[in-house]
Amino acid sequence: MTERGPYAKGRAKRAEILDAALEVIDKQGYAAATVKELADAVGLSQNGLLHYFGSKDALFAEILRRRDELAEIAINTQRPGFAEGLVEALLDAVDEETSSPGLAQLALRVTGEATEPDHLAHEFIGRRYELVRAVVRDAVTELQKTGRLAPEIDAEAVAALVFASWDGLRIQWMYDRTIDLRRQMAYLLRALGLTIDAPVATGD
């Protein structure tokens, strides 16, 4: 059934706020993402803005969730051929991070603060890590089944190491923008055995 009334309007306003916040952070940087700036962007008071989320922490967690939703739609990990394009997809994601440092800072902020078990975004971030690891793990496993990656590669370990390195490199890049994140990540992927060119030859 189609939502009607105040509930539907509330959901629509939340979506408007989140999309506006992403635009502010992308264009003006994370430092510009104050509650006042975000409220001004959608024509609300600060209290009016927080009414839709409950708190500033909840707002920023939902901004990150919205960003993930849009990225998932754009990447579409379920499409045919995604596994074969895994390396390029990961490197493109790195490029996306460097093109929008404000959004990268947002992700690091929420992720870091949510390590506290009682943080409202703790479960969301934990699940987020599970999902992104699963994407890489499943793609590696599929490529192994089709003979395009060596069978001895540990798909679970690769998935964990890719995102551990990604987080670490992003933090370093925040301090030193001369670091070439794409080159560093490409090196890591090669070191982990993720060079997808042709089926791996196997003995009889």
Image (cartoon, rainbow, N blue to C red):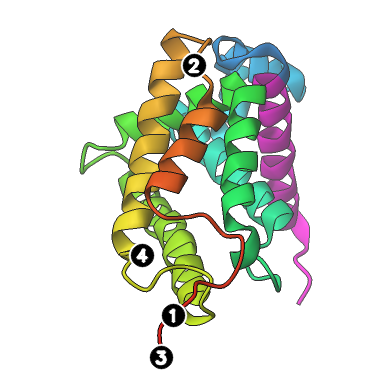
**First in sequence: mark 4 vs mark 2:** 4
Residue 33 at what x, y percent from top left? 59, 17
Residue 136 appears left or right of 37:
left
What element does badge 3 sit on? loop
Task: Tell me the distance, in whole angstroms, between the alpha carbons under discs 1 and 2.
Answer: 38 Å
The boundaries of the magenta stretch are 1-26
- Provide the residue designation for mark 2: 179
How would you rate the neighbour count of disc 1 (Cα within 10 Å): few for under 14, some for 14-19, many for 20 or more? few
- Provide the residue designation for mark 3: 204
Which residue is nearer to you in this view: 107 or 93?
93
Marks 4,2: beta carbons within 8 A: no
Residue 91 appears left or right of 150:
right
Q: Who's the residue at 52% across and 55% down the image? A: 195
Which residue is nearer to you in this view: 94 or 127?
94
- Provide the residue designation for mark 1: 202
Residue 94 at what x, y percent from top left? 57, 35
Where the N terminus falls, by quadrant? bottom right
